[in-house]
Image (cartoon, rainbow, N blue to C red):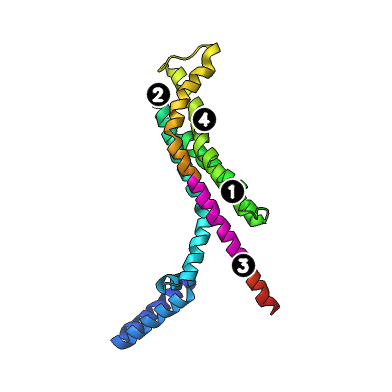
Amino acid sequence: MDFLLGLQSSSCSWKKFERLPEKDKYVAICTLSAICIFWHPILRCVLFKCSTCIACYSRRKLFGYGPAYLGGNAAFAGLIANSLFRRVLNVTQGRVTSCLPMAVLPFLTTMALYNGAVSQPLLSGDLNCPTCTIVRGGLVGVVAGGMYPIFLALPVNAALAARYNTAPMPEKGNRMRFWFSVTQPIMRKMTFVMILQALFGVFLSSRHYDIYIKMLQLSATDSEDLHN
């Protein structure tokens, strides 16, 4: 019943609006738009190009979604390593079975490791050294985003090669040397990917440290304003 009354009142209001002159309609629409713009801060910042607010919004977005970007690069590195191992071992079966863990596991591992090594210590105040932050970010990029996908792709594709007999398997006394000879050229090809992951981890951690410093400065100014 209340819903029907609301519809009836809204239809009456719309009829009254239609009866207004064109000039009054234009004024009403402009007034409503102004109220919406000044009521919503993000929309106001975008339309008036408030650089400070847009920068703050982009910083929050980078701090929240930065580890996901690094994890996405790690997933891409995992797919590349998986493709290289499949080519070396002549594996053509189980494409989805090998690609799915090679994309999901590096993504989740890199995100968790970066949050545990960089993001959470910064937010809790346990990490106050810029050099340590950058080193941690670079190590996460290299280890979790570059080396881990390679070492993960080796047993996955080795199991597929042994199951489908696509490549000759080594004897018991020669396994380490065989897998080392298989992995070494792939590591060389993945060197560029690991360098990119390290650079991206360094860049992301340095930006996160800058955001952390600006957060401390804002909190200090807010506390001074409260005391004054």
Q: Which residue is mark 1?
A: 115
Q: Amino acid at mark 3?
A: Gln
| Magenta segment main secondary structure | helix
Marker disc for residue 151 = 4
Task: Tell me if label 4 and label 1 are in contact, CB under 8 Å.
Answer: no
Q: Earlier in the sequence, mark 4 or mark 2?
A: 2
Q: Pick whichever, 192 or 176, lies toward us.
A: 192
Q: Which residue is mark 2?
A: 88
Q: Earlier in the sequence, mark 4 or mark 1?
A: 1
Q: SS of the residue at dot 2? A: helix
Tell which tag, 2 or 3, sits nearer the viewer: 3
Q: SS of the residue at dot 1? A: helix
Q: Position of residue 78 (x, y in %)?
A: 46, 36
Q: Amino acid at mark 4?
A: Phe
Q: Residue at x 68, y 76 (%)?
A: 226
Q: Is residue 158 toward the left or the right of residue 30 in the image?
A: right
Whether 88 is drawn above or below 40: the answer is above
Q: Amino acid at mark 2?
A: Val
Q: Position of residue 13 (x, y in %)?
A: 39, 81
Q: Position of residue 33 (x, y in %)?
A: 40, 78
Q: CA distance from mark 4 to mark 3?
A: 42 Å
